[in-house]
Amino acid sequence: MLTYKLIQKNQELLVAFYGAVDERSPAVLNELLARLNATEVVLDMEAVEYFNSLGIRAWAHFVKSLVAGRTVSYERCPPDFINQINMMPLLAQSIEILSFSSEFICPDCNHSQRENFDAHLTKAQLLNAFEKATCSQCGSGLLPDEDPETILYFKSQQKTN
Ligand SMILES: [Zn+2]
């Protein structure tokens, strides 16, 4: 079940989402659209647990309506959501991605760890940051759990300001 919390920060309205984006989400998203009167909206995606195909369809419909007359951005996109955007770039059309996280695995102790990144960095800077990620348990260098080029595909789809 998808829920959200609205947090007003100066001019911006932050919408923090929680839970699953699935076939039950259209009602929640339509209700949210109806009450949104802010023109600058930031969607905090960190606590979204998963998306199924019906949920993604509802989400695409939601953001298409949301961007009309508004400046919208995504922050703290989890790996699953970045995957969805990479498969379906229209989910981030006219929406700036501010930050995202990726999953890493330690080749020495098998610890898995999520790392946050600033999406304003260039692709080269992000690849460099991926290489510098270190294990919080043993200090070894971490490996991304997916091909970095695949993870960062969305960078080439985003319009630079
Ligand atoms: Zn380790």
Image (cartoon, rainbow, N blue to C red):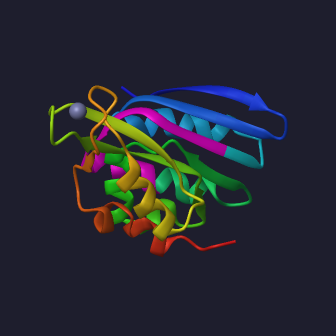
- Horizontal arrangement in the rendering, residue 109 relative to residue 35 (left or right): left
**Span of residues in magenta:** 42-60
Give the residue displayed 56% in from the left and 49% down from the top. 74
Picture coordinates of residue 144 (x, y %)?
27, 51
Give the residue displayed 50% in from the left and 61% down from the top. 92
User: Does residue 81 sit above or below 109 in this rendering?
Assistant: below
Q: Quadrant of ligand 1?
A: top left
User: Does residue 73 sit above or below 92 in this rendering?
Assistant: above
Relative to the observer, which residue lies in front, 129 or 35?
Answer: 129
Residue 146 position by quadrant: bottom left
Residue 97 position by quadrant: bottom right
* The C terminus lies in quadrant: bottom right
Give the residue displayed 70% in from the left and 39% down from the top. 36
Is residue 111 magenta-colored?
A: no
Residue 95 position by quadrant: bottom right
Outermost residue on the front side: it is 139
* The N terminus lies in quadrant: top left
- Horizontal arrangement in the rendering, residue 22 relative to residue 33 (left or right): left
* Residue 97 visible to an observer of this rendering: yes
- Horizontal arrangement in the rendering, residue 31 relative to residue 28 (left or right): right
Give the residue displayed 56% in from the left and 31% down from the top. 16
Picture coordinates of residue 80 (x, y %)?
31, 46
Relative to the observer, which residue lies in front, 85 or 119?
Answer: 119
* Residue 87 visible to an observer of this rendering: no
Picture coordinates of residue 125 (x, y %)?
50, 64
Relative to the observer, which residue lies in front, 90 or 36?
Answer: 90
Is residue 51 magenta-colored?
A: yes
Relative to the observer, which residue lies in front, 56 or 16?
Answer: 16
